[in-house]
Amino acid sequence: MIAPVLPTYARAKVSFERGEGVRVFTPEGESYLDFGAGVAVTSCGHCHPHLVAALTEQASKIWHTSNLYQMPGQERLAQRLIDASFAETVFFTNSGAEALECSIKMARKYHAAQGHPEKYRLITFEGAFHGRTLATIAAGGQAKYLEGFGPKVEGFDQVPFGDHEALKMAIGPETAGILIEPVQGEGGIRPVPPQCLKGLRELCDAHGILLVFDEVQCGIGRTGKLFAHEWAGIAPDIMAIAKGIGGGFPLGACLATEKAAVGMTAGTHGSTFGGNPLATAVGNAVLDVVLEPGFLESVQQRALTLKQKLAGLKDTHPTIIDDIRGFGLMMGIKCKVPNTAFQAAAFDQHLMTIGAGDNVVRLLPPLVVTDADITEAVDKLDRACRALEAKAAA
Ligand SMILES: *Cc1c(COP(=O)(O)O)cnc(C)c1O
């Protein structure tokens, strides 16, 4: 008999009824250190008092009005994202995939508005993940997500990650732009080097095509800057965000320059829930935390601690850990054992992690993580590695 909830997830047999900061608690009162943050979502930790206050205060005023009316909270959040980024305009969504849908539609519409509707194709990269809608599985190009769901949505040309020649060859008269995650998340924590992001910007400018970033996972302070691409000193034309901006409340956005958004006039796109008063109250509260002076610098410091300790862990356990990747609080452990076994061993130590492609385990702690939390997490990982070594020896 089919489960009441459509069985598309392989869920662990555990639930959590309460969270506080970097910790979550089972109904039995057992505590776990959360270094997954619900896949980079609970950016401010669980039940951050400022977010709880913002949500409950808004909940007692008004929840939803639809985008048929003015929404001061939404306008405020848009203006703050604009002030803190390259963007000049923002469309709000409920998820990352929808933020990508808007980004893809906008890139196509830009060229259509210039009289070039034939320019609708986006170049994407192997290992990419952009969501689970029909267009975003086509953009991601992963066979396991496409299979059985009918013809792949047209208009995506995938090139190998880091293959500059293939990329240049892929640009043709129908190319609308390049879509890329500045740091691949699901693909296994693969950062795009800053000089390559710069190269992409130059390539797009040279061809009159748009640069579209997917910062759904790496954005909102995850790498120690508000947006990961800031490390490269360049900016995209369009960018999708989600995950961290809602801090746990479903919220995403498509940020763009005025130029890139030229075709997106009244009636061209919409969302019933997107950017509703509850969501944007929380989004504004997240920005209060993340944009507080010194916060991102403290993320950078914590990140350094984490990276150093993980490097030490790799040296201590060369038969378990192959490599440490990533930067900021977006780290990947490439395993020599199956990543699922590594994750299970960490979970036995009450440490939550997230799997990824390329046999990687992701560490994506809330941005409010402390050095003491990091020490505790790495101790747990050390014990997990020792348990795996003992198992291999037995
Ligand atoms: C999670 C993710 C998405 C999809 O977001 P959803 O909210 O699950 O639709 C898209 N791109 C990247 C890089 C992501 O990590």
Image (spheres, helix red, strand yellow):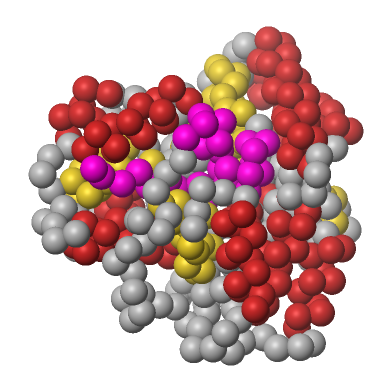
The answer to whether residue 40 of the structure is visible from this angle is: no
Q: Quadrant of residue 330?
A: top right
Q: Position of residue 212 (x, y in %)?
A: 38, 47
Q: Residue at x 24, y 34 (%)?
A: 206
Image quadrant containing the N terminus: bottom left
Q: Nearer the viewer, residue 10 or 127?
A: 127
* 168 shown above or below 354: above
Residue 274 location (% of width, % of height): 52, 75
In-image side of 166 versus 200 (left or right): left
Q: Nearer the viewer, residue 53 or 284?
A: 284
x and y percentages locating residue 298 in the rendered image: 80, 35
229 in the magenta segment: yes
The structure residue drawn at horizontal position 51% and vertical position 48%, both measured from the top left corner, is: 86
In the rendered structure, does residue 9 fall within the stretch colored magenta? Answer: no
**Which SS type dominates the magenta stretch?**
loop
Where does residue 50 sit, x and y in percent of width and height?
84, 63
Which is nearer the eye, 257 or 23?
Answer: 257
| Picture quadrant where residue 222 is located | top right
Above or below, comparing residue 313 to residue 114 in the picture? above
Residue at the location (49% across, 89% down)? 68
Is residue 33 shown above or below 310?
Answer: below
Which image quarter holds the C terminus?
top right
Question: Residues in magenta?
Answer: 208-234
Lateral position of residue 318 relative to residue 184, left or right: right
Residue located 54% across and 88% down the image: 69
Q: Is residue 263 visible?
A: yes
